[in-house]
Image (cartoon, grey):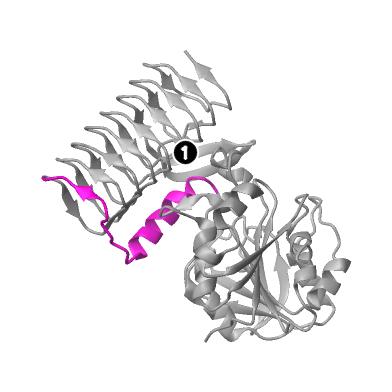
């Protein structure tokens, strides 16, 4: 069923603070999964459901988003931009699009630009919604950090925000269908303890006023990359489900490829290189000779990887230069990084990582580098250590702690 009459509001104004240092230079929605921004995956899923009219609510690093997607024509949709100048919550973000929603529109869709969804996920809500508002839910065993839903049959009775515990295993995905009347309730929504106007408070107000808010379950793909290291799981999931296997570059004699591997235009894979998919290598890359690329790895555009370097389960963004004899595993390397010969990212499982005084667990992680760093030869980065942006590390160093912006290690 196609819903080409329906508009979609995509919330893409946030910074993604928990995805530092990658979001020091881009918003979370522009982080790449399988070599495409998360937001592009969202827009593609909408387009495949026949939803062509998209309102993008932008804010932080909005120019990157607008320069990439422009008017949406290249993505099969029509994009209109509105700006949320201050990060005052999801209800406030939706309200910014009010002037673009006609009162005669029967309903519209709202979703986050930083959650990976497949077309069927959206279709599950489009095909089953009812009442004054509907929200899409997934069942999760570990609900810590998520809003959960209490309901009677389909009807939602209460939404509890980010409270761990056994009250409910039904998690709110943040994907909604509203009628234009929701804007009247948004105007009455109280400010929350953290100084924001949350759409979940709007929904609770609707419930308290006796309006019908329904919960629509889905078992289709919905991935929330909360922290930077969650991108690795999302990347692996998308690569494993992808059917794309184009090889448009040049493969020299002696290259061995196993599994699903996509290679972009004007890329050369030199002799002796061994690649095991699923993997994606972008355009204008120079790989090898004698490089090993193992599963769940994506390499962006304009990347060079020199001899005897091994990369596995990692994301390498655009414009990187990786020298010989490197070892990169379970890591994310931002754009425009230069890594000297013998660069090694140590990896460990069940890491405890301190972010702004709160301990978070990473299942398995090497390192995360922001953009524009210069790393010398024979540098070892300890597991879980993050390097921000525009840092310089001289040869022979071991990096034991996080490096902030513009750090120099001699």
Residue 205 located left or right of residue 359: right
Residue occupying the point 38% across, 42% down:
330
Residue occupying the point 36% across, 32% down:
321
Which span of residues is magenta-colored? 227-253
Which residue is identified by label 1? Answer: 335
Above or below 50: residue 381: above
So how many labels did they put on this image?
Answer: 1
Pick the residue in front: 285 or 240: 285
Residue 54 located left or right of residue 237: right
For label 1, the SS is: loop
Residue 24 coordinates in the image, percent (x, y): 60, 38
| Residue 10 seen in the current view | yes
10 Å crowding of disc 1: few (<14), some (14-19), many (20+): many
Q: Which residue is most to the right?
A: 188
Residue 3 located left or right of residue 305: right
Residue occupying the point 51% across, 60% down:
40
Q: Is residue 243 magenta?
A: yes
Pick the residue in front: 162 or 10: 10
Residue 60 coordinates in the image, percent (x, y): 67, 47
Above or below 232: residue 183: below
Residue occupying the point 55% across, 53% down:
68
| Residue 171 seen in the current view | no
Pick the residue in front: 101 or 160: 101
Pick the residue in front: 299 or 134: 299
């Amino acid at each position: 069923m196609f819903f080409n009459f329906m508009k979609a509001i995509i919330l893409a104004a946030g910074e993604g603070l928990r995805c530092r240092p990658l979001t020091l230079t881009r918003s979370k929605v522009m982080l790449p999964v399988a070599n495409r921004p998360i937001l592009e995956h969202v827009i593609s899923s909408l387009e495949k459901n026949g939803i062509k009219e998209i309102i993008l609510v932008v804010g932080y690093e909005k120019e990157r988003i607008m320069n990439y997607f422009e008017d949406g024509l290249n993505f099969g949709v029509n994009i209109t931009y509105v700006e949320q100048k201050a990060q005052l919550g999801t209800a406030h973000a939706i309200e910014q699009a009010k002037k673009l929603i006609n009162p005669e529109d029967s309903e519209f869709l709202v979703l986050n630009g930083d959650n990976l969804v497949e077309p069927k996920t959206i279709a599950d809500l489009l095909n089953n919604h009812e009442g004054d508002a509907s929200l899409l839910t997934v069942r999760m065993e570990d609900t810590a950090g998520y809003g959960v839903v209490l309901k009677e049959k389909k009807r939602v009775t209460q939404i509890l925000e980010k409270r761990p515990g056994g009250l409910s295993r039904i998690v709110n995905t943040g994907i909604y269908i509203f009628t234009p009347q929701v804007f009247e309730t948004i105007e009455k929504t109280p400010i929350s303890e953290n100084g924001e106007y949350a759409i979940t408070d709007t929904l609770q107000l609707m419930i308290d006023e006796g309006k019908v808010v329904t919960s629509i379950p889905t078992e289709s793909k919905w991935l929330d990359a909360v922290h930077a290291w969650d991108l690795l799981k999302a990347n692996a999931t998308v690569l494993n489900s992808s059917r794309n296997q184009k090889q448009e570059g040049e493969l020299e004699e002696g290259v061995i490829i196993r599994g699903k591997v996509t290679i972009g235009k004007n890329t050369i894979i030199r002799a002796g290189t061994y690649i095991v998919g699923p993997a994606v290598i972008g355009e204008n890359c120079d790989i090898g000779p004698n490089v090993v690329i193992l599963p769940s790895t994506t390499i962006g555009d304009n990347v060079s990887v020199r001899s005897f370097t091994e990369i596995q389960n990692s994301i390498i963004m655009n414009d990187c230069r990786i020298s010989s004899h490197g070892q990169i595993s379970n890591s994310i390397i931002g754009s425009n990084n230069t890594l000297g010969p013998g660069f090694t990212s140590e990896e460990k499982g069940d890491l405890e990582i301190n972010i702004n005084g709160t301990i978070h667990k990473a299942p398995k992680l090497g390192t995360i580098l922001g953009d524009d760093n210069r790393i010398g030869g024979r540098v070892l980065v300890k597991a879980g250590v993050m390097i921000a942006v525009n840092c310089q590390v001289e040869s022979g160093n071991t990096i034991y702690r996080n490096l902030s912006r513009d750090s120099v290690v001699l």
